[in-house]
Image (cartoon, helix red, strand yellow):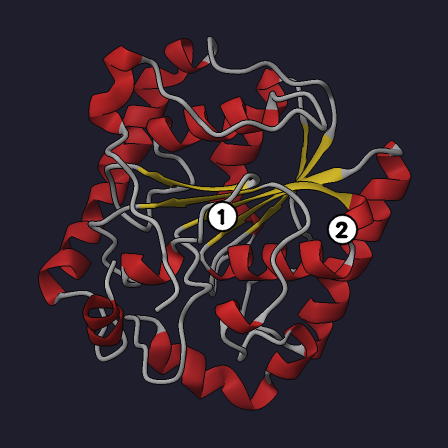
Amino acid sequence: MDAAERSHAGVRAPSALLLAAEQRAVLELGAFVAASPLLRMAGRGDRHPVLVLPGFTAGDRSTLPLRWFLRSQGWWAHGWHLGPNFGPTRRIVTGIQERLDELHGLHGRRVSIVGWSLGGIYARELARRKPELVRQVITLGSPFRMVDGDRSWASGMYETLSPAHRAELLRIAEREEDRDRLAVPSTAIYTRTDGIVRWHTCIDERSERSENIEVRGSHSGLGHNPTVLAVIADRLAQPEGQWRPFRPYPWAKVWYPRPASWHPS
């Protein structure tokens, strides 16, 4: 993505047509149910803990299919137990850190964090604050590269709730390129047909321990899209300390287009 495209990305939300297409999430849920037998062949878990963080205004109910799938595959998948995600309030900022500490203490192992949309922004911050507790981070349509002027279809509600936010506690108002790189492996999953946030804001600079994976689908369906779940299982199944970039099987490449990468201007 060149500088001009990045500049254009900061002036508006996705098109109204893409927003309307978010209704595909219902079809993706149906595809999840239909594909469940095939998903059994995805990576098998090693019983390490996985913390799943919901998107803006959503709670643990929204991540039930994802957590059910992960538990059935052999991981200890946990919700965040903090109710609806109304943004970085002091209660949520404190609560996610305490939840990470709790799960690490309960299992005695480093925790993988899967964050959907705003939940992924929290996940990356947790990994920066406590890398010794985090095994890897996987984000689903998380706009961690939004800057002043960027808009999404959730911006209006987010701004309405902003008086209760303590964004400085998570430093989420800072530009991603001005922050330290994550010290743990990270996977950014995104879709170019995202109808809520601009996909350009959801991709990372690739490195020896970071990657972007493009999928076909909607923003609202990322948590139960079968192709996304297959990626998550593949990433979590890697032995700790032996992380490698995702490589889809040749026959599956139609579902995983060649991913874009963010490059500093």
- Within-10-Å neighbours for mark 1: few <14, some 14–19, many 20+: many
User: Disc 2 and disc 1: Cα gap in Å?
Assistant: 16 Å
- For residue 206, the mark is none
Above-or-below relation of 140 to 97: above
Element at badge 2? helix
Which residue is painted at 63% across and 64% down in the image? 180
Which residue is painted at 65% across and 82% down in the image? 168
In this image, 66 relative to 171: left or right?
Answer: left
Residue under numbered circle 2: 131
Of labels 2 and 1, earlier in sequence is 2
Which residue is painted at 68% across and 68% down in the image? 92
Q: Could you say where residue 200 lies in the image, as x and y percent from the top left?
A: 30, 60
Q: Could you say where residue 251 lies in the image, as x and y percent from the top left?
A: 25, 12
Q: Could you say where residue 167 lies in the image, as x and y percent from the top left?
A: 60, 80
- Within-10-Å neighbours for mark 2: few <14, some 14–19, many 20+: some
Quadrant of the rendering where the N terminus is positioned: bottom left
Residue under numbered circle 1: 139
Above-or-below relation of 185 to 118: above
**Which image quadrant is residue 181 in?**
bottom right
Q: Nearer the viewer, mark 2 or mark 1?
A: 2
Q: Amino acid at mark 1?
A: Thr
Above-or-below relation of 25 to 164: above
Q: Amino acid at mark 2?
A: Pro
Q: In this rendered view, identify the residue nearer to me: 66 or 43.
A: 43
